[in-house]
């Protein structure tokens, strides 16, 4: 995350897909089933929904679609919150 932090400030549209990839790996390592439709309905639905919304924005950027800067900012904010959540969850164990 530290390596991406500067890029998120200087070129958020370029850094967002990398941040989404990092969070995908972290969520998977933490046991979140991102591809499981049941996870979208269960206890972890907020976490999964936040990630999927940010991933969609990142995917749109990777396809060179036009993306509103506010959507990019919201995705980054959401992924940063998930990062903090995962770090806190891991330190609690």
Image (cartoon, helix red, strand yellow):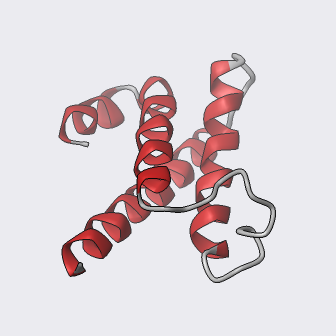
Q: What percent of the width, then of the height, locates residue 48?
A: 63, 63
Q: Residue at x 47, y 55 (%)?
A: 27
Q: Residue at x 43, y 63 (%)?
A: 82
Q: Does 39 sit above or below residue 26?
A: below
- Looking at the rendered image, the quarter that the N terminus falls into is top left
Q: What percent of the width, then of the height, locates residue 51?
A: 59, 55
Q: Residue at x 55, y 62 (%)?
A: 32
Q: What percent of the width, then of the height, locates residue 18?
A: 44, 30
Q: Does 92 sit above or below residue 17?
A: below
- Please tell me which residue lies in front, 89 or 79: 89
Q: Does 56 sit above or below residue 40?
A: above
Q: Residue at x 23, y 78 (%)?
A: 93
Q: Is residue 34 left or right of residue 38?
A: left
> Residue 84 occupies which quadrant of the picture?
bottom left
Q: Is residue 12 left or right of residue 41?
A: left
Could you tell me how many numbered marks the image carries?
0
- Please tell me which residue lies in front, 25 or 57: 25
> Residue 36 occupies which quadrant of the picture?
bottom right
Q: What percent of the width, then of the height, locates residue 28?
A: 49, 51
Q: Is residue 65 left or right of residue 54?
A: right
């Amino acid at each position: 995350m530290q390596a991406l932090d500067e890029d998120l400030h200087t070129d958020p549209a370029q850094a967002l897909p990398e941040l989404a990839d990092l969070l995908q790996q972290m969520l998977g390592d933490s046991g979140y089933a991102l591809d499981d439709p049941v996870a979208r309905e269960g206890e972890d639905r907020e976490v999964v929904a936040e990630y999927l919304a940010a991933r969609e924005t990142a995917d749109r950027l990777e396809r060179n679609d036009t993306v509103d800067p506010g959507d990019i900012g919201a995705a980054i904010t959401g992924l940063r919150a998930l990062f903090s959540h995962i770090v806190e969850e891991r330190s609690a164990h």
